[in-house]
Structures are given as C-alpha cells and as structure tokens.
Image: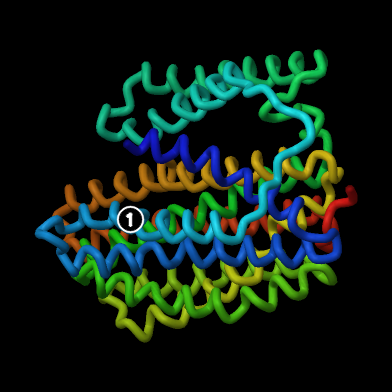
Amino acid sequence: MRVAQGLAGGLMIPQVFGVIRASFAPEARGKALGVYGAVLGLASVAGPLLGGVLTEADLLGLGWRAVFWVNVPIAIIGLIIGIRFLPESTAAGGARLDLPGAMLAAAASVLLLLPLVQGREWGWPWWGFAILASAIFVAALFLLRERRLAARGGQPILDPALLRVRAFAGGLSVSLLFFGAIGSFFLLLSLYLQLGTGRTALETGLVILPYAVGSIVTSGVGAQLAHRAGRALIVSGALVLAASQVVLLLLVRGGAAPSFWALAAPLFLGGLGLGLTAPSLINVVLAGVPGKDAGAAGGVLTTVTQLGNALGVAALGAVFFARVEGSFTGAATPLAAYGDGLTAILPWQIACYVVAAALMFLLPARAHAPHA
C-alpha cells in the first residue's frame, strides 16, 4: 500500500510545476512557487501534531493506525478543489514514459536505503555493504541510459545535461542535505520526547507546535523577499536552523527532561529558519535553470527532496538507535539513553545545515521566474 501511495505521489507532485507554469504569468510565477514552498515547509511540521491528535483520539480503537486516515479527507478535498479550480495544462506534444529509467532509479534508491534502514537489525553483515555498493553501480547505469536516451532525442526522467547547470547541481545537493536533516529531526525528536521524557503523542505534537508557529511567521516574508534577496534569505535560514540545533543540543545534554517552555525557544527559532528557507529554495534553484527545463528540473528536485527525507531518517536513525542501545547496555534510564541518542545525531544535523548553507552560494542571488 505504501508503494501504491508513492506511485500516486510520484505522478502528482511534479505536475505542480507544470500547472504553475501554465496558470501564472512569468512575473507572478515566483510568488506562486514561493507559496508552494511555504506549504511544503508547513506540512513537514504539521504532520507530528496531526499524528498526535489522531493517536490520542484512538478512533474506533485503532490507536496509532488512525494516522493513515489523515490522507483520506485531504485527498477528497484536493479532488474537489482540483476539479473546480485547476485548469487543464497539457502540452502540445506528447511524451513517452521512460519506464526503464524509472525502474533503474527506483532500484538504485531501494539498494541505497534498504541496508541503511535494516542494517542494524541484520547485524551489519558484509552482504549489506555489498547491496549498498551495488546502488552506485545501478545509479551509474541509470545515468548512462538517460544520456543515451537524450542523445537519441528522447525524453529522459533526468537529462544528465542538467547536472552541468551549476544552480541545479547545487540545488540537488542542498535539498538532499537540508531536507535530510529536517526529516530525521522530527522523527528522532518525537522518539526522544515520547520514549525518553514520557510524553504522550499529543503532548509531543504540542511541543513541536512552536516550530510550526515560527515557520508561519517567516514563510510569508520568505516568499515576498525571494525575488530580491533569495540566496541571502535561504543561507540565513539554514544558519538559523543550525543555531537552533546548537541550543537544543546544549539543552538535552543537561540530563533532565526539558520543560515545554525550555524546548519552545530553540524549536521556535528552528521554525523561523525553516520559514525563511523552504518557501524560497525551489524558486531560487529554478531561477538558474533554463525555462524549457524548469518542469523537469522541478520534478527531479522534488524527488530528491523526498529521497533526502528518507536518507536522513535511515542514516541518522541508524546512529540514533546504535547510541540508544549502547546506553541501555550500560543500564542507563530511558531519559538518559534517548537523550544520548539525540545528542549523537544533533551535531550531524548541524553539519548538514552548515554545509547546505555553504553550497547555497552556488545558487542564483535572486529568485525569479525562469525565462520562457
């Protein structure tokens, strides 16, 4: 069912860029992309809160399983709004599905993520590392196929020529690091709050609420200023996020269970950073991509964002659980064990934001709609 959900999402999400491109004049396109980025940022912090509400509600005795229902009303409302308001935006010419390319890309992703997710349970055998290494081989096959398809005049999923565009290549690296840190942070913080400090799922969602509030405060500012100071804005946001993680690291290292208000300050600060960065990042990256390639570049960028989320959870999750298990071996309390796990991954997340901020200097200075 998760595979089916992913297939549907993969069909839908890249169309957002096509609809925006077809529905907005060039001068209004930047603001539309900024709003799209703001929604992405808010959605990432709304998930834990909604999940906590559904878990606590225990609908029909389903417990945590009710979280899967959150997509049902969203899908119904989205379908109604789409039918009512979205214009058709088909292109004049048709396109053939690059099914072999899609299968190679999917295989490379599975070969990369599976050993990272399951390696701890497997006991890190040699064949797990062999699977990980094979991901590089399959990724190389994918790029070779896409290059040959593009040379024949076909329409590949990823045109390797785009990787030579500095803004696009830099944007992929930034998205991988930035959203990898974001995705892993909410999951691992939630585990620390629930299993370490003993908070309920709803209480955990409420603790994360200041993050959402901070994001709301700066999302509008980020979308409005992106066309004048896009790169400076997203660099500032990434560094603010890094600073918030430093404060949180010092707080958790104290040993005691932090109060709601103690956690609210660094989480609110992190939300401010997310609101400055997420609404503008896609827009700034696409500003450096030729207009004819903006749709394809946007689809690949969104896919890499999702891959970054999964990779961050897999890699940093492995570090987190290894430290937690080691602490329990030393007879630590749950608070101390999960606190050790969180302090082990926070420096890596801080490094992700700092390196992402450095790579952002490869991006255009301002966000603007790509030329047609």
Secondary structure, mark 1, is: helix
Query: Horizontally, is 125 left or right of 309 in the view?
Result: left
Specify few, some or many for label 1: CA neighbours under 10 Å numbering under 14, 14-19, or 20 or more: many
Q: Mark 1 = which residue?
A: 341
Task: Identify whether 176 is placed above or below 255.
Answer: above
Task: Identify whether 17 is placed above or below 49.
Answer: above
Query: Horizontally, is 247 left or right of 166 in the view?
Result: left
Residue at (20, 57) in percent of width and height: 64
Residue at (18, 52) in percent of width and height: 328
Quadrant in the rendering for residue 40: bottom right
Residue 212 lies, in percent from the top left, at 47, 74
Quadrant in the rendering for residue 61: bottom left
Q: Quadrant of the N terminus?
A: top left
Residue at (65, 77) in percent of width and height: 220
Q: Residue furthest right?
A: 371
Residue 109 lies, in percent from the top left, at 50, 29
Q: Nearer the viewer, residue 299 or 12?
A: 12
Residue 214 lies, in percent from the top left, at 53, 78
Query: Horizontally, is 168 left or right of 56 in the view?
Result: right
Residue at (65, 66) in percent of width and height: 35
Q: Residue furthest left?
A: 61
